[in-house]
Image (cartoon, grey):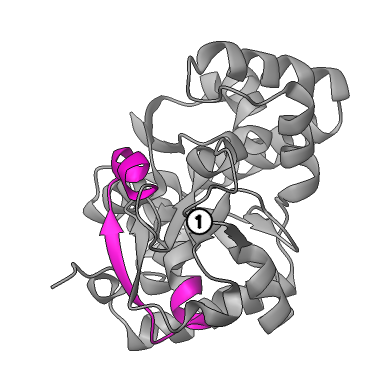
Amino acid sequence: MIQFGDIAYLNTLPVMAAFWRSYADAFSLTRVRGTPSQLNTGLLSGSLDISGISAACFVRHQQDLLLLPELSISSNGPVESVLILSPVPWQQLASQPFIHVSGASASAATMLQYLLPNLRQVIFLPEALNSLLECSEPILVIGDQALTLTMPCKSHPYVIDVATQWHQQTHLPAVFGVWAARRTWAETHPERFQAISHALIKSKADFFGSDSFQQIVISEALADSGQTLQGLSMQRIQHYLTQSIRYDWSPAHEAAVTRLATVSQNQDAASLVRPLS
């Protein structure tokens, strides 16, 4: 069985929805759902063979990983799901003693390290967000949790989109996620690697080729989410998936990932999120 890691966020639906419906049965797959950080660990440990992962994980370990072509989770502007909730505007954020960073984050934390290299990052578990919102300290929130927040709030009047800040400073897309395989697995099973790569590209085309399919997929996601996506309408989600997020790969995306690598060369993974002493 091929161990396949599937990021448990809405923003993977355009690549993964048709894959699980129409293509996955051609392969012997075990589907493993998790946050980007969890799947990063699984792929690097060898418990996963192929997975959606953080772009930051790929750049740190690209000698051990092989990128699937023509795919990314990225944005050329506001992304809506990678947000800093702050008591001060962006221009004053560097003066804060630290920022709380979601433990589910890797790429966003690395981008923030690039943009504000002297701002100390303190990890928090996503379930602790509500208690943090009672304090007046900046918080980096990602994924569906960021998308469903009611903002701004009194303690955090400034809502800062990390992708916007990255694009304004680098003039490159913000690349948050990619799909990759363990290099040893891909080299041992080149036909399976190529077949799964092509199936994911076809799956992406299926999603963007049919408005009715998009609505079916989003309706099912809302129905299956329980309280997780409470407050989000189908129109909001469809706009998010088709306008805010991009799923292609280009020389600009490669340059953006290379820029992330400059942070990773100077900071190991552990130093990006440090406990407050």
Residue pictured at 40% horizontal, 61% vertical: 106
Residue 74 part of the magenta segment: no
- When the figure is inspected, residue 266 is found, relative to residue 248, above or below; the finding is below
Q: Which residues are magenta?
A: 111-133
Q: Position of residue 248 (x, y in %)?
A: 73, 55
Amino acid tagged 1: His
Q: Position of residue 246 (x, y in %)?
A: 73, 52
Closest to the observer, 87 or 266: 87
**Count of marks overlaid on the render:** 1
Element at label 1 = loop
Question: Based on the displayed image, in which of its 4 quarters is residue 83 positioned?
Answer: bottom right
Question: Based on the displayed image, in which of its 4 quarters is residue 249 positioned?
Answer: bottom right
Closest to the observer, 191 or 163: 163
User: Which quadrant holds the C terminus?
Assistant: bottom left
Residue 48 visible from this viewpoint: no
Residue pictured at 54% horizontal, 24% vertical: 24
Residue pictured at 24% horizontal, 49% vertical: 46
Q: Locate residue 184 relative to residue 178 in the image: left or right.
A: left
Residue 115 part of the magenta segment: yes
Which residue is the site of mark 1?
Answer: 156
Closest to the observer, 52 or 221: 221
Residue pictured at 69% horizontal, 67% vertical: 164
- When the figure is inspected, residue 176 is found, relative to residue 147, above or below; the finding is below
Residue 238 visible from this viewpoint: yes
Closest to the observer, 80 or 90: 90
Q: Position of residue 147 (x, y in %)?
A: 59, 40
